[in-house]
Amino acid sequence: MSSSPDETAPLFDISGLHYRYVGAQADALADLDLEVQEGEFVALVGANGSGKSTLARLLGGLERPAAARHAVACGHDLLTETGRLAARRDVGVLFQNPENQLVAQCVEDDVAFGLENLAWPAADIRRRVDEMLARFGLEGLRRREPHLLSGGQKQRTALAGVIALPRRVLVLDEPTAMLDPAGRDEVLEAVRELRDEGLAIVYITQEMDETAGADRVIALERGTEAYAGDAAGLFADVALVRRLGLGLPAAGELGLALAERGRGFRGLPLTMGELLDALAGAP
């Protein structure tokens, strides 16, 4: 398979993907299919142990699939070592604990780290780092040591370092899981801006409110696909949501409680705005 990217093909083109950890009795991912198109925002949900983080590492070329009919990321064959190495250039991966991705003595050096490893010219590195610091609101923190940052600042620094290298797709593995509400809002705003600019995003989360506005939601159960469709379709199937251990968005939980008390809705509200509109009788 060619290792050169095809601009018209899906960014992720995965079929029959399997992965098993050493010593495990069952596959962490089993016969999984996935396609993600240019500019698409896909939310990936599932209970702990469903395979979400394993899939993130495979998509980023950080692990080798045990088997697949085909596994392509941005035109690179994930079944080969050269393909996985090439995929790491095009696929940015951000994990839930930013401290695992902060490696330098200060913020600006951390953002520059990947560029320096790829031997970018010094002037280009300076321009790109300045751009990333401005973009993520980190200009006043450029000389700050990472351990002195707030959780949101750490994650924005890690995200700036990932995006400093031009990417075709971003995989975020529960990026707000370790943050307080203020830090969560900071990261979500940064992700919204990246999406608005057309970057394809695979967003892994256990916070169902964070699926709002996704083009598609994919739910995993024991390493296989249990649902693929829009968020409204998933949360309308309350029995499936409960079986998967997902819960509902806060507005959906409240709407369901109100419905059980006789307040009818045309469809289950998924955001507080939708719930307020429904309660006010808005169409």
Image (spheres, rainbow, N blue to C red):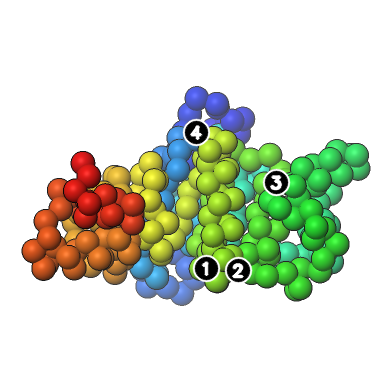
The residue where tag 3 is placed is: 135
- Locate the C terminus and report the quarter of the image it occupies: top left
Q: Is label 4 or label 1 in front?
A: 1
Q: Position of residue 272 (x, y in %)?
A: 33, 56
Q: Are marks 3 and 1 in contact (CB under 8 Å)?
A: no
Q: Amino acid at mark 2?
A: Asn
Residue 65: tell me if it is visible.
no
The residue where tag 4 is placed is: 38
Q: Is label 1 or label 2 in front?
A: 1
The residue where tag 1 is placed is: 181
Residue closer to the observer: 226 or 112: 112
Q: Is label 3 or label 4 in front?
A: 3
Q: Is residue 90 above or below residue 23?
A: above
Q: Is residue 103 left or right of residue 91?
A: right
Q: Secondary structure at mark 4?
A: loop
Residue closer to the observer: 255 or 87: 255
Q: Label 2 vs label 3: CA separation?
A: 21 Å
Q: Label 3 vs label 4: CA separation?
A: 22 Å
Q: Are marks 2 and 3 in contact (CB under 8 Å)?
A: no
Q: Label 1 vs label 2: CA separation?
A: 16 Å
Q: State which tag comes first along the sequence, 2 or 4.
A: 4
Q: State which tag comes first along the sequence, 4 or 1.
A: 4
For image coordinates 48% across by 29% down, the residue present is 9
Q: Secondary structure at mark 2?
A: loop
Q: Position of residue 55 (x, y in %)?
A: 47, 56
Q: Label 2 vs label 4: CA separation?
A: 27 Å
Q: Is residue 279 left or right of residue 118?
A: left
Q: State which tag comes first along the sequence, 1 or 2.
A: 2
Q: Secondary structure at mark 1?
A: helix
For image coordinates 38% across by 59% down, the residue present is 209
Q: Secondary structure at mark 3?
A: helix
